[in-house]
Amino acid sequence: MTKSLETHELRKTFGGVTALDGATVKFRHGRVNALIGPNGSGKTTFFNCVTGMIRPDSGTTTYQGQDITRKTPHAIVRAGIGRTFQLCRVFPRMTALDNVLAAVRPGGITRALLGARHPSEVDRARSWLTRLGIEHLAGVEARNMSWGQQKLLELAGVLNAGPETILLDEPAGGVNPALLDRIGSLVRELNAEGRTFVIVEHNMDLVMSISDHIVVFDRGRPIAEGTPAAIRSDERVLGAYLGV
Amino acid sequence: MRNVSRWATSGGAVLLVAALLLFPSVAPNPYVLSAGIVVLNYAVLSTSWNFVGGFTGYISLGHGALAGLGGYATGLLVVKAGLSSFLALFAAAVLVGLVAVPVGFAALRVRGASFVIVSIAIVLILLLVFQSWASFTGGSRGLVVPRPFPDLSRPEHHRAFWYLYSGLLALALLAWWLVDRSRFGLGLKAVREDEDKAEALGTPTFAYKMIVFVVSAFFTALGGGLYALWFGDLDPVFQFSILSGSYLVLMALLGGVRNLFGPVVGAVVVGVALEYFKVSFGDTQLHLVATGVLLGLVVMFMPDGVLPALAALVKRLRPDDSATIREETAEELRDRRLANAGDKR
Amino acid sequence: MDGALLFQSVVLGLLLGGLYALLAAGLTLYFGIMRVVMIAHSAFLILAAYLAWWTHTELGIDPLLSMIVTVPLFFGAGVLLQRGLLSRLRPMTLTMMSVLLTFAIAVTIEGLLGYAFTGTQRRIQLGYGSASFGLFGARIAVVKLIAFGLAAVALGGLYLLMKRTRFGWALRATIQHQDAARLVGIDTARIAGYGFGLGLATAAVGGTALSLDTTIYPSLHWHWIGPLMAIIVVGGLGSVPGAAAAALILGLAQSVLQIPMGTTWAQTVFYLALFATLAFRPQGFFGGRLAQRF
């Protein structure tokens, strides 16, 4: 069996609005996958359903062959799926180091009564901060950091939870071009180390340059998928974006 | 910063231990000592409240009633079941911890607003039950709890309870401190900052909230039970009052919910103030107004408490303070980087 | 069980439920506008009842006339409360801190009432206070019907205001999505203030209705806040129709259960409903989407 993150016929409505309309998608393991589509096409709702933040009305999600549809968000993290949020979310009144330490790694719950600043934990957390180039901010409260720094910090936290698969919700949103390049190469690096990505993103340059596989959403369901080259020349995609 | 706060914690601990040991000898008369015990009772309850309020940011107005339940359970176990006083105290606290489980199940599955509503409802329900079920609880006539040390004179009795309360306070503070520095505590603080985010980083937020709520209820009940044994007379109107619950919140908030000793400081300030209000306003309802205005002022202008406000003041008076912090961190980092240089890349 | 007695309880329950519905509507408005659980709502209710009582005993005019003053007064107080105090709290801890702030206001009002009017129980003696009429064997006091009428008129007015006016449209938009409302040019800050004023005005009407046939004392508000809280949770926080439905059903249940259980134990129905709702259906039984997260 190939390892993958799959959804089958996910459906979710809010009041009268259908956010997901029978979304069946498969993201293969080891790839950088992108999920694109016009605003309101259900991408974030899709993330929220997959990560257990909201419960779909019907349909299933399986990860590595295991049904995770009704699991709680923290259990899904332990199963190996981490995520960032659309408008980056960090713990504002906690230091950068504590932000990263707050991620629960597999087996971390049984050691809950351990000191939070156990040297081995701190070393690991700091190494993530170093990797993302924000180690000099370890002692700074997150609310005093810049937007770009907070985005990196959020990613550091997610990485410290040790997920195999990472869902990024608009990683390029509101960041400057230099940081954009860095995020792009970081994703490729982490992917080379064996992590799978699913990225929701509007910046097409970034999407086209880093992804192996692209899924296009429109009105709550996939309408096309394929390699960046194939997607670029797909007329349905153009139609969805331009409303033709 | 961490070093500064470590010094503050140790210094606070030394001061507190000294005060706890010396107060009975310097208290001029039994009245002052008994007033001191009332304040100490508040300190225990407010610290217990702070397990939930301080770590998770969930504000309970019902902890006064949990203390009352602990008191009544202790009293009833002594009177009706014939248990010895301190066995009853412990059993009552366990019992209240168990009661906290279904309460927490209803209150903690959803977010803050429902929690507050449930915490208020608990007070009203318990008041209703304990007033109306007179055949079991004594109803509005109250419940007389036999004293655990019948041979002691009144001052000796106060003195014994002063030390019992001191021990309990030390225990509660120790537990809070342990949680504060644990991974569990970090998870709870993450809940306070952003619950969805904490969950998305793998924290089982519901279980964490539940555990800390039960721990908090346990200590609260111990405080309430000890009060029952000391005071010897329980009245539902005072045991199950939202007002007494709000005192605990006011104390913790005033002292600072993120500080180990915040609630203790708050208990001393508010406890003394309450005593003063009672003396100067007598039977009028102005003590309610004073409490309300004080709480409103704290919420509007000092939501982080006086201790943090003082800390900020100290920081402002020492302009080079922030520089030293940064230097320290940078130094640590340099070491770390050198150590890491070998195995990374 | 006696059929007439049961029928009487049902009627009284519905009349009481109407008052609950009006008050719960106010609470729901506050919650919808800024996720605030307004503990002081019932304290303002009792304040209005005291003002009605004072109008009657000191000025010797009908207590209903006190509304000419109290309704605009409370509206202003609500706007001030929102603009001057609640909107100045930190957004991050707003839900929790607003509870404490409104609690502080409730305690202050209770204290001031106790100081001004003492803790003595008060009751309005009306000329038509003891008048009643028979309806299929049940006896219904006229004042209860007046109270219900007041509640129904106020609730109906609120409904029309919300559904038919431009202000209502702006208020509903603000409740549903503050940012989106701002984008379409609604001054959400001002609308939120007026929304609070409206909510508090319902307390003025409710308090006047309450004063007609109830014995009042300063700490009475604690007996109201519990049931009202239960109603808004059962109704699904933030949903006005949900709150109204829950108010009628629970008011009815309380009234009917008084026959076998007595007045004291019948109150537990609110708390049982509250716990059952939170344990099994935290979003409430009629409720909107809001509730899931609170």
Image (cartoon, rainbow, N blue to C red):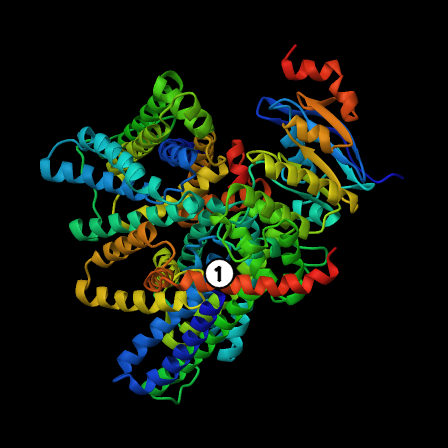
Q: Quadrant of residue B187?
A: bottom right
Q: Is residue C94 above or below residue B225?
A: above
Identify the chain of the residue marked 1, using the numbered disc in the image.
B
Q: Is residue B10 above or below residue A17?
A: below
Residue under label 1:
B326
Q: Is residue B63 left or right of residue C144?
A: right
Percent from the top left, x then y, of residue C70? 21, 33
Identify the residue shown where x is 69% and y is 15%: A238
Q: Quadrant of residue A13?
A: top right
Residue at the farthest top position: A244
Percent from the top left, x then y, of residue C175? 43, 29
Identify the residue shown where x is 52% and y is 41%: A147
Identify the residue shown where x is 60% and y is 45%: A152
- Residues A181 and A235: in front is A181
Percent from the top left, x then y, of residue A66? 80, 42
Q: Is residue B95 left or right of residue A83?
A: left
